[in-house]
Image (spheres, grey):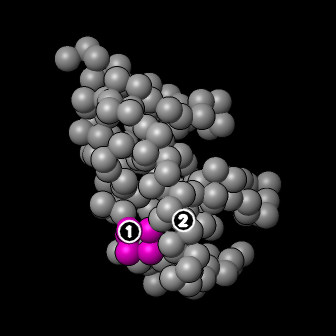
Amino acid sequence: MTRKIRKQSSHQSKTFQTRIKKVQKVLKDGEILLIFAANHKIRNRDVEYKFRQNSDFYYLTGITEEDSILVLTKYQSVMFCLPKDKEREIWTGIRLGKETIRQMLNLDASYDLSEWKNKQFELFLGNHTLFHFFGEDTSRDLEILSTLRSIFST
């Protein structure tokens, strides 16, 4: 199943950049917000449900790609997303890629999703409050809790 990914106009990009900045202004020192994009849900065998983006993720970014992660603190905006992959894009649709997303949203940094596990520790370290919608995805919740346990046990 392919889906259309379209690049935002500069006006749309400004709207999403403004929304991200507004959230950052509300965050206090030591607070971190994680918002995960939706992922594809398998219906049966090789049939997927129609993809629907997480509303909060879409409101802040306007991005319709799956499996991305937006990380915001008062002073930092970071996105983790699926890498460009010409072979996969034939079947799943074009991916924007980390550089396009970073530029579109004027983020401080963007990384391939594969770097998430290595970067979690440094992103969480030094923050005392985590805002995350627990209960939406158990495996993500457990991963985050595991990382936090390792931070607080050291």
Kindly identify which residue carries mark 1: 106
Q: Amino acid at mark 1?
A: Asn
Q: On the picture, is 20 further left or further right than 134?
A: left
Residue 114 in percent (x, y) is at: 36, 56
Specify start and end residues of the magenta stretch as a single range. 102-106
Q: CA distance from mark 2 to mark 1?
A: 9 Å
21 vs 118, left or right, is: right
Judging by the rendered image, the residue that carries numbered circle 2 is 16
Residue 63: image quadrant is: bottom right
Find residue 24 and name its label. Answer: none
Q: Residue at x 50, y 62 (%)?
A: 18
Q: In the rendered image of this protein, does residue 57 appear above or below residue 82?
A: above
Decide whether the magenta segment is chiefly helix, strand or loop: helix
Earlier along the polypeptide chain: callout 2 or callout 1?
Answer: 2
Residue 76: % across, % down: 32, 50
Residue 60 position (above or below residue 15): above
Q: Position of residue 111 (x, y in %)?
A: 33, 61
Identified at 66% across, 37% down, the residue is 136
